[in-house]
Amino acid sequence: MSMNARPILIIGGGVAGMTAAVEAAEVGHRVILVEKEAYLGGRVMRTHRYFPKMCPPACGFEINVRRIRQNPRIVVHTLATVEEVKGHVGNFEVRIRIRPRYVTGRPTLDNDLLERLTSERDNDFNLGMDRTKALYYPHEMAYPPLHVLDRDALSDTDAALLTEAAPEGAVDLEMTEEILTVKAGAVVVATGWKPYDAANLDHLGFGRCRNVITNVMMERLAAGNGPTAGAILRPSDGKPARNVAFVQCAGSRDENHLPYCSSVCCMGSLKQVRYLREKTDDARASVFYIDIRTVGRLEKFYQDMLADEQVEFIKGKVALIEEDTGSNDLILDVEDTLSRQTLHPRFDLVVLATGMVPNTVDTKFPDELVYDEYGFIDESTEIPGIYAAGCARHPCDVARTTKEAMAAALRSIQCQYGGD
């Protein structure tokens, strides 16, 4: 690889961004990887398991972290956002804003100091379902392996304690934002997705009924490092959820919310049904669906769930969810479109399968890219030297995301040598 080639800038440190980074670097190209969170891994690190193999995300993540850690061609910036890109293929100029971590990592901090602090914050890794200290470690496999300080949540008393008790140089309460300007030969946009805001679905009770949660919250409940240490409990009273409804297409395929199918929600819910059945022998699951979309080899996963006598599939869209004030149970109003009956079943817990929304809906990539009506980057209008991968382009699963990331890395190299 020519040493004259400029590095590839990769925006987003989730599965797509990490894959593109290691693939490009391991064939000799320099990479600048920019991630807005304090750690790499993206939303996949918040899941309990992948489908269909049901292995934890830590497996693939650990391998990619090792590849990044051992490769001097990769420079990682976390707590960082790209604010401006200008120029052309082979010669982009990029402005990056890096927010302060307030922790230097030199020397490291120990947990005894953290326990002495009283200031707390909502734990965003667990989607606000529990809390951490203002000085916290994002999760046990976080990379970079550094604590983070939420300066806004830190009390004056705790600030004084850190100044006095932290090892010299470990915490810098005066750290400020940093602006970097770098040159890049090509750019990979791997900015990922966020779940559709279930608060928009008042008829389905999120925010109104305490035991209505979303599919991303269910992932954290099932995870051993989640807010309940892997127990699937009702938020209202902490009791085990043994009769659970899974409501498909919560806001999806709906012209008032998300008109499109996110392609992964059916498999995600089937996976979560399996979580429930594995953790509690007598648990029952009811899946309310429009269509079950499990393409190709994933059909076997669906057939296995159909064979489970404790799992019921009801073809019908849920019109309303209400809460029983005495028990906090949930009562659904749904028409079974096969039997033509109106049903009013009662459940301990309801899980809403909300769809994928590209992060580019809120934060447009700073260049003249074109977006479709849903906020995804329009592939037909790519700018030479700028390539999108994964959920920045369309809803997709991890397997497809990694393939697209590898393709984006290859194109980012080729474009600097006259190919594409």
Image (cartoon, rainbow, N blue to C red):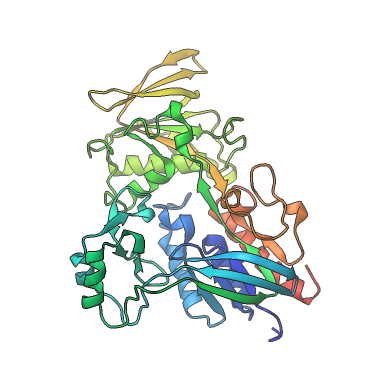
Q: Establish if 149 lies above or below 292.
A: below
Quarter of the figure with the N terminus: bottom right
> How many marks do you count on the picture?
0
In the image, 332: left or right of 26?
left
**Residue 410 placement (x, y as % from top left):** 69, 69
**Residue 272 placement (x, y as % from top left):** 40, 42
Considering depth in this image, is 92 or 16 the residue closer to the camera?
92
Q: Establish if 262 lies above or below 345.
A: below
Is residue 182 among the parts visible in the rendering?
Answer: yes
Quarter of the figure with the C terminus: bottom right
Q: From this viewpoint, which residue is outermost toward the right?
A: 418
Residue drawn at 71 percent across, 85 percent down: 4
Q: Establish if 96 lies above or below 362.
A: below
Q: From this viewpoint, which residue is outermost toward the top?
A: 341
Residue drawn at 51 percent across, 61 percent down: 14
Is residue 410 among the parts visible in the rendering?
Answer: no
In the image, 129: left or right of 2?
left
Q: Establish if 249 lies above or below 165.
A: above
**Residue 284 placement (x, y as % from top left):** 33, 32
**Residue 327 placement (x, y as % from top left):** 23, 25
Considering depth in this image, is 111 or 54 the residue closer to the camera?
111
Residue drawn at 47 percent across, 71 percent down: 177
Considering depth in this image, is 366 or 29 the residue closer to the camera?
366
The answer to which quarter of the image holds residue 411 is bottom right
